[in-house]
Image (cartoon, grey):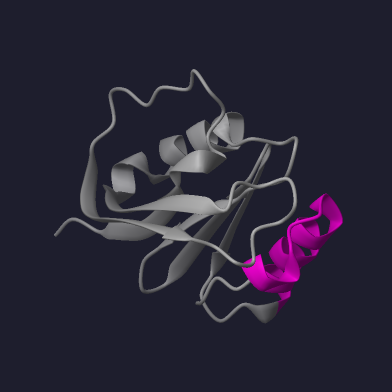
Amino acid sequence: MTIMYDGVLITQSLRPGTELDGMRLVVTKITTFDNASAAADQPTRWTLLYFAVDEADADRLAAWLADSLIAEPGVWYADFKNASEHFVIFPERIFRYRIGDNTARARAVDHGRRLGVPEAQLDWGD
């Protein structure tokens, strides 16, 4: 049985020129909306790409995201999870923790706060 992770990526969070190749993502939904909680240095129109990735590609995808997310202006993160584990990725930093590990989750949230991610955006669920 293949274990899959489900995630969401804000396409505006990627640095121009980044390219994901050689890894299979299954797109499950795409939606665009105007985000009232966008920070002053973030665009207000966001496109969300919902996806699934195989466990075999999870570490590689996390590393690619850590290298590809915009660090300035504004700070972004992406995340994906399965029933037992959660990846939260910031520019140049990956947090991987067991669902229910509140201490590990708090470290990821604190890192986002230190980077300046708006509080309303530190709302990923476990």
Q: Nearer the viewer, residue 105 or 41?
A: 41
Residue 36 left/right relative to 22 = right
Q: Is residue 36 above or below residue 76?
A: below
Q: Residue at x 52, y 37 (%)?
A: 65
Magenta highlight: main SS = helix
Image quadrant where residue 102 sits = bottom right
Q: Residue furthest top?
A: 17
Confirm whether residue 89 shows in the render.
Answer: yes
In the rendered image, the quadrant that contains the N terminus is: bottom left
Question: Where does the magenta region start and end?
Answer: 103-122
Q: Nearer the viewer, residue 33 or 119?
A: 33
Q: Residue at x 55, y 71 (%)?
A: 124
How many numbered tags mark residues here? 0
Q: Residue at x 36, y 74 (%)?
A: 83
Coordinates of residue 54 in the picture (x, y in percent): 27, 48
Confirm whether residue 122 shows in the render.
Answer: no
Q: Residue furthest right?
A: 114
Coordinates of residue 9 in the picture (x, y in percent): 44, 50
Q: Nearer the viewer, residue 123 or 41?
A: 41
Is residue 117 rendered magenta in the image? yes
